[in-house]
Image (tube, rainbow, N blue to C red):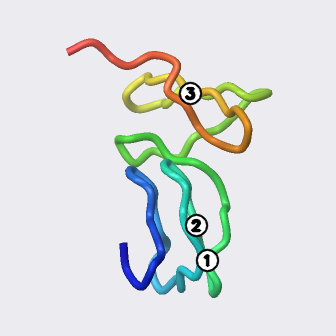
C-alpha cells in the first residue's frame, strides 16, 4: 500500500501508469490515471473470457468473474 492506495495481489500495472485508486486482485490497469483494461492470471498471462469464464493458456487455471471480481474456479495440481 502506498499513500492509501492498495494494489491487489497478482495484479499488473502498466509501465508509466499513475495509480490513483485501489486496484483489484488479478486486474490489469494501464494509463494516466490507471484504468482497468483486463485480467491476468497468477502466472502473468492475460486472460480472455467467454461469458464470465476464462482459462489461462499458460498454466490452465480457470477463473470466473462474479460481482466485478475474479475468482479462481480450480487450481493446477502440485
User: Which residue lies at the image location 58% right of the left edge and 48% below the top edge?
Assistant: 39
| Residue on which disc 3 sits | 63
Q: Residue furthest top?
A: 77
| Residue on which disc 1 sits | 34
Q: Marks 1 and 2: in contact by CB < 8 Å?
A: yes
Among numbered discs 1 and 3, the one appearing first in the sequence? 1
Vertical side of 46 occupied by 64: above or below: above
The dot on residue 13 is: none
Mark 2 residue element: strand
**Quadrant of the image containing the C terminus:** top left
Q: Gap in Å between the C-alphas at discs 1 and 3? A: 23 Å
Label 2: few (<14), some or many (≥20) within 10 Å?
many
Q: Percent position (x, y) of residue 21?
A: 59, 75
| Residue on which disc 2 sits | 29
Among numbered discs 2 and 1, the one appearing first in the sequence? 2
Vertical side of 61 occupied by 43: above or below: below
User: Which residue lies at the image location 67% right of the left edge and 25% below the top edge?
Assistant: 53
Q: Residue furthest left?
A: 78
Q: Percent position (x, y) of residue 59?
A: 37, 28
Label 3: few (<14), some or many (≥20) within 10 Å?
many
User: Would you say 35 lies left or right of 51 here?
Assistant: left
Mark 3 residue element: strand
Vertical side of 51 occupied by 29: above or below: below
Amino acid at each position: 500500500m502506498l499513500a492509501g492506495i492498495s494494489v491487489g495481489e497478482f495484479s499488473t500495472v502498466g509501465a508509466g501508469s499513475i495509480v490513483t485508486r485501489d486496484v483489484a486482485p488479478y486486474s490489469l490497469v494501464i494509463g494516466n490515471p490507471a484504468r482497468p483494461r483486463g485480467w491476468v492470471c497468477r502466472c502473468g498471462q492475460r486472460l480472455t473470457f467467454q461469458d464470465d469464464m476464462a482459462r489461462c493458456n499458460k498454466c490452465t487455471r480457470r477463473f470466473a468473474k462474479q460481482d466485478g471480481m475474479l475468482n479462481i474456479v480450480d487450481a493446477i495440481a502440485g
